[in-house]
Image (cartoon, helix red, strand yellow):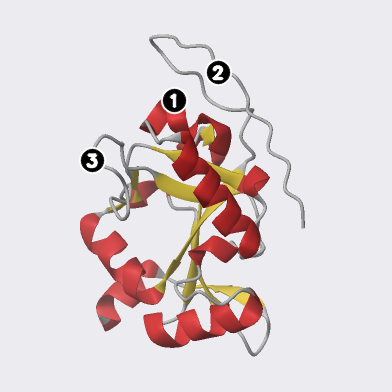
Amino acid sequence: MKIHLSLIPILASDQPTAGPDPPENIYHYTTGLKLRSIINSGCIKPTTAKIEPHEKPVAWFSTSPTREPTATKVPVPGMQGQIETAKAQGGLVRITVPGTCAPYVFPQLPLIAGTKPSVCIGLLVAGLELGSDPDTWRFTPTPVPTALFREVEFYDFASNQWLAIDLAELACRN
């Protein structure tokens, strides 16, 4: 497979502009174990995992309403990776938030977060290998508070659909 990359020049300015108009909803894909820490902290925090000291952490989202392959926590592409992740991490979770919560698109990562182009290419290749579409990726360097959550759902493999959960009920059980 050949991969063709096009670099998009971004003019330097004091205030970076947001990416293209966001969709109405975007999704943060995570796991049941991570959902607990998101609820306890009161927000989706930008991740500090595997970033260079000079980079700003970002929180990742997707415009894809079905799933985001890069949210898989095991290096197995496709549904098998999703199944293994769900078993090891207490299920798969999708959090719906307004599209304005993550105003930036992947090509803006070097400008907004200070990520090296070589690292961006590595992220791009890894995402493509897992079956992701980088055109669906959006991010923000700021936390997204739980007050902005429109819906929280767990994936049900038996019915092959996302099922909404009541966060108040979940908090009572935990």
Residue situated in front as seen by the camera: 153 or 37: 37
Q: Position of residue 14 (x, y in %)?
A: 38, 9
Q: Position of residue 171 (x, y in %)?
A: 28, 73
Mark 3 and mark 2: span between their CA atoms? 23 Å
Look at the picture and state if 9 lies above or below 57: above
Q: Which residue is mark 3?
A: 53
Give left or right: position of 142 versus 138: left
Question: What's the mark number on residue 74?
Answer: none
Q: At 48% from the left edge and 35% from the top edge, which residue is drawn?
A: 117
Q: Earlier in the sequence, mark 3 or mark 2?
A: 2
Residue situated in front as seen by the camera: 83 or 6: 6
Q: Which residue is mark 2?
A: 10
Q: Earlier in the sequence, mark 2 or mark 1?
A: 2
Q: Which residue is mark 1?
A: 111
Evaluate whether residue 172 shows in this view. yes
Q: Position of residue 91 (x, y in %)?
A: 45, 80
